[in-house]
Amino acid sequence: MSVKAATEKNFRRARVKPGKRRSSKRPVSWRAIRIVVIGVLVTYAVYRACDLVLSASALQVRHISVNGNSKMSVAEVHALADGVRGKSILTADLAAYRRRLLASPWVAEVGLRRVLPSTVEVFISEREPMGLCRLQKQLYLVDRAGVLIDEFGPQYAQFDLPLIDGLVRPPSSGQPAIDERRAEFAARVIDGIAPRKDLARSISQIDVNDLHDAVVLIEGDTALLHLGDDRFLERLQSYVDVAPALRERVQDIDYVDLRFKDHLYVRPVTAAHKRP
């Protein structure tokens, strides 16, 4: 038996209209526009402010202060660093001017410092000549590192320095060069005798051809003094002590070998070994 359910007239399927799809495009925000505009204006203002500061005449380099120089004149230092004048002290390329100063043979080390509002300070460490070096028939001031500083001339007459032979090594190719080992050896000889200023001033010539035997000449004496590679002051003093007695026995001495403890070996000048 089937039962037919009564139809409910009041019940109907709800008719729902599909909603409109929202657009993915958002309306332009005036607030965002204002932020962008303000950002652009601030950036431009900062740029203009920096430009005004960097170009301000009060911050342009007007003074170059030089410290530590004794051989180089202030004018020479100014000539090498003069391009920095008129530059902004905040942006001047001091490293470039440092390189220019280091190109001078007298300059061993240099530092530059900005001092607001308009000064650049230059601190120079100069090379110290230890002697004169013969190179291609010319004499040059040379330092203990073997750097040729400048050609020796009347402008350097205040330097009382020994002539150092044997520094130049034969060139394998190109120009002759200073042997750094021999320069260091010559510096050791000079430093070893330096405590006795009177003896140090008396040395007129040093030969370092042999790295194990420094040969020196002293003023007023033609004898070559072989000092070896150590105890330079002790050996030189031993010769000075006995030189008058030696001259009484041997008038013309070719060389004196002082390398042996408690012994002096003296070679007189003969016709076959007479030095020019």
Image (cartoon, grey):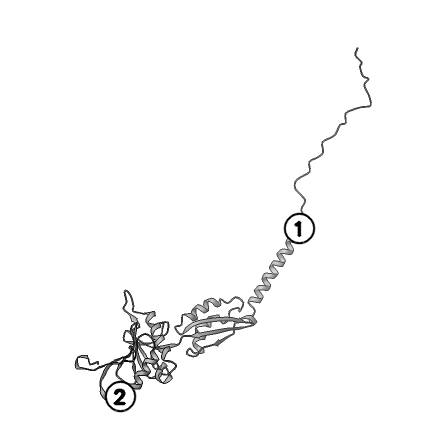
Nearer-the-camera pick, 182 or 55: 182
Which residue is at 48% across, 74% downward? Answer: 123
Q: Which residue position is annotated with label 1?
A: 32
Which residue is at 60% across, 59% downward? Answer: 44
Mark in front: 2 vs 1: 2
Which residue is at 55% across, 70% downward? Answer: 59
Amino acid type for the residue under numbered disc 1: Ala
Nearer-the-camera pick, 133 or 255: 255
Q: How far apart in space, not on screen, are marks 2 and 1 (Cα)? A: 105 Å
| Residue 14, quarter of the rendered image | top right
Whole-percent x, y for residue 183 in the image: 34, 72
Q: Which residue position is annotated with label 2?
A: 245
Nearer-the-camera pick, 221 or 77: 221
Whole-percent x, y for residue 89 in the image: 53, 69
Neighbour class for label 2 at 10 Å: few (<14), some, many (≥20)? few
Does residue 173 appear left or right of residue 125 in this picture? left
Residue 49 appears anywhere in the view: yes
Of labels 2 and 1, earlier in sequence is: 1
Which residue is at 62% across, 56% downward? Answer: 40
Does residue 202 appear left or right of residue 270 in this picture? right
Secondary structure under tag 1 reads: helix
Does residue 178 appear left or right of residue 39 in this picture? left
Amino acid type for the residue under numbered disc 2: Ala
Does residue 196 appear left or right of residue 265 in this picture? right
